[in-house]
Image (cartoon, rainbow, N blue to C red):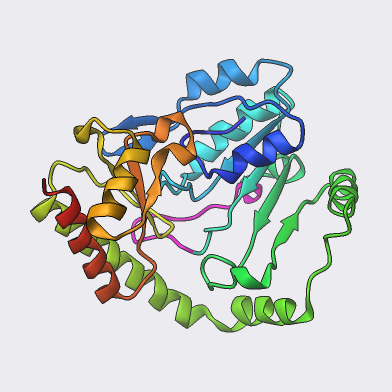
Amino acid sequence: MVQTPVYNCFFSSIRNNGCEIVTNPLIYINGTYQINFDDLEKKAADPKVKLLLLCNPHNPAGRVWTKQELVRIGKICLQNDILIVADEIHCELFFPGHTYTPFASVSEEFLMHSVTCTSPSKAFNLAGLQIANIISADTNIRMRIEKAINVNEVCDVNPFGIEALMAAYNDSEEWLDKLNHYLFANYNYLKNYFKEHLLQFPVIRLEGTYLVWIDCSVLKLSSKEIVKTLLKRGKIRVNEGSLYGEAGDHFIRINIACPRQTLIDGLNRIRCALSN
């Protein structure tokens, strides 16, 4: 089960493992997203549902789930014997007024009934080193994970990646604080720019990550058509919302993890392309 709109690789990973996708669509309301707990309870009651892929912070909805929300998710999953796999790859990236809570930290039960996936790839821009962490406190689950990642002998990591990971986690706190402040300033700049020049396109409230979700439904075009228009008229490429499920159509996703001047240039291109 996934909570859509959600990271596109969730869909391919599920299909590649011979499983069926069940969606628990998020509720889009007042410029943000909420979990549809009634729908979650209904879908979780199906004995065929064995696993929830939880995205926290959520990409592309921009939510950093509160502890209270995580408790409700966890209780529903425990009641229905559903394993939670928490993709927390953006966990270091959250903005003032919001606190990231690891799902496994909420309770001992949640810890033993979950798998947490993290990586320095996003916050520290180390994706090219292909280094990540799969964390589980349950011995049987760890054995299953070890077997799965060894099927095609693709589990080995390079020593340089390990050193980079340790440097990022042990020696980069000051840098990370500055990064979060910079990203928050970029988000505020984008938000104010849209308010001044592109008011008809609501900017979804961003609590974490560096991926801004924009509502372009006023155009009455598919996200694929919008992306083509931006590329043709503005020479700028953004992500089409439909990549993240049907609930993402009519939206686009913008990456703001860039120098301010690059962001300004990109926003001017978007304005030029959409002004007509």
Q: Position of residue 163 (x, y in %)?
A: 71, 82
Q: Is residue 27 above or below residue 122?
A: above
Is 62 magenta? The answer is no
Q: Is residue 262 above or below residue 58?
A: below
Of residues 228 and 247, the one drawn nearer to the viewer in this rendering: 228
Q: Is residue 124 above or below residue 218?
A: below
State which region is magenta: 93-105
Tell me, yes or no, if residue 166 can be seen here: yes
Residue displayed at 88% across by 53% down: 152
Query: Residue pushed farthest front?
Result: 232
Q: Quadrant of residue 41?
A: top right
Q: Quadrant of residue 222?
A: top left
| Numbered circles on residues, count | 0
Q: Quadrant of residue 263?
A: bottom left
Please identify the quadrant where the N terminus is shown: top right
Residue displayed at 11% across by 45% down: 276
Q: Position of residue 270 (x, y in %)?
A: 22, 56
Is 104 magenta? The answer is yes
Residue displayed at 83% across by 67% down: 156
Tell me, yes or no, if residue 84 can be seen here: no
- Answer left or right for 114 relative to 228: right
- Magenta highlight: main SS: loop
Q: Position of residue 60 (x, y in %)?
A: 43, 46
Of residues 171 and 236, the one drawn nearer to the viewer in this rendering: 236
Q: Position of residue 111 (x, y in %)?
A: 72, 46
- Answer left or right for 143 relative to 55: right
Residue displayed at 71% across by 61% down: 133
Q: Is residue 4 above or below residue 230?
A: above
